[in-house]
Amino acid sequence: MTGPTTGPMAQPTTHATETRAVHTTAEVLATKTVGAYQHVSLVAPGVGERSRPGSFLAFSIGDGHLARRAFWIHRVVSMGGHRAVVEIVVEPRGPGSRALAGLPAGARVEVTGPLGRPFPLPRDPARCLLVGEGYAAAALTGLAERLRERGCGVRLVLGGVDDPHVLEPLAARRSVGQVEVAVGDLTAAVLRAVPEVDIVYAAGPVATLRFVAEAVTGSEASCQVALERPLTCATGLCQGCPVPVLDDAGEPHVVRACVDGPVFRSGRVDWAALS
Ligand SMILES: Cc1cc2nc3c(=O)[nH]c(=O)nc-3n(C[C@H](O)[C@H](O)[C@H](O)COP(=O)(O)OP(=O)(O)OC[C@H]3O[C@@H](n4cnc5c(N)ncnc54)[C@H](O)[C@@H]3O)c2cc1C
């Protein structure tokens, strides 16, 4: 891997603040099927330009009977002014994601975002490992770009249960320095890469995040995870997305995934208590 390095335990420090969300009516600009996913591009005034790597959007779908549904921001393409286009990756599985995936170009949908605490970025160039599984790899796309802009070496492990569930490996190879596709099981790829990096960023199912967190323990790397918990209001009011964490003294606390996360330092999460 190339790129200058920082010392051991490089801690990402910047841009860790919550982003300012707006609520708006978005218009579907385009929609396309790629593998197992539906990529939906939206014109959402004021949303794209506020987003940071790791931000997510909350959609109010259907007739309002569904709780808000959360989706990572995959890409932001500037169109000038407030017309940044935001792309999300939807895996159709339940009523909300199926409805969103089925929206035609020109349809309108209520959205709030960008939400959540984004990935902190390193102050100095560092060797970074990004681990993304399934649709959640969408949370890492903007992060990889920002890290490379900062002179970081970026290595990506891209996983999925099968080929259609590996998110855009060709596009990733074009934009990221080093990409390893691990279909079915990414654990060996992660174990190989962790000793060679300063910072690990991971997005995927909880079991994968826990594995990455444990792989980093005892290494010299620090680790940030983008943790998905089922959300209700997505803005911190309802307290419906508890995440058990441990403070510096090892004392347990509960915080909210939507506003205190969804990005957490992996060592802060009380993985054993996370059901
Ligand atoms: C911050 C965040 C970002 C997300 N980004 C994306 C994304 O980019 N693309 C995408 O397709 N999905 C994403 N999700 C997951 C998506 O929001 C949920 O799966 C949502 O519940 C889908 O709504 P639904 O009505 O289709 O399914 P539901 O009827 O709500 O759920 C279908 C099934 O999935 C289970 N489920 C719901 N949420 C989760 C979860 N977070 N983890 C594991 N199982 C769950 C339910 O228990 C149920 O069995 C994200 C979730 C969070 C919290």
Image (tube, grey):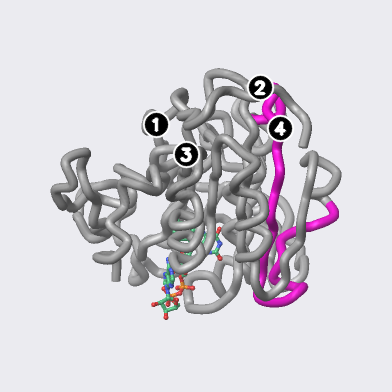
Magenta stretch: includes residue 106: no
Residues 153 and 63: in front is 153
Q: Local crowd at mark 2 within 10 Å, few (<14), some, or many (≥20)?
A: some
Q: Which residue is mark 2?
A: 150
Q: Which residues are magenta?
A: 147-170
First in residue order: circle 1 vs circle 3: 1
Give the image location of residue 256, x and y in percent. Answer: 26, 50
Residue 37 at x, y = what percent?
Answer: 68, 68
Disc 4 or disc 1, which is closer to the eye? 4
Q: Which residue in the structure is indicated by mark 1? A: 20
Q: Name which residue lies at 76% across and 67% down.
A: 33
Q: In this orientation, does residue 215 appear?
A: yes
Mark 1 touches mark 2? (CB < 8 Å): no
Q: Are marks 3 and 4 in contact (CB under 8 Å)?
A: no
Work out how far the residue at label 1 is from the one at label 3, CA to CA, in angstroms.
27 Å
Most extreme residue toward the top is: 124
Query: What residue is at 53 percent from the left and 70 percent from the top?
Result: 97
Residue beneath label 4, please? 153
Q: Nearer the viewer, mark 2 or mark 3?
A: 3
Q: Does 163 appear in magenta?
A: yes
Give the alpha-carbon distance from disc 2 to disc 3, as whole Å: 18 Å
- At mark 2, the secondary structure is loop
Position of 66 with respect to 171 (left or right) is: left
Mark number displayed over residue 222: 3
- Disc 1 to disc 2, C-alpha distance: 23 Å
Q: Secondary structure at mark 4?
A: strand
Left or right of 219? Residue 184 is right
Position of 259 relative to 238 (above/below): above
Please state which amino acid type lies under the numbered disc 2. Arg
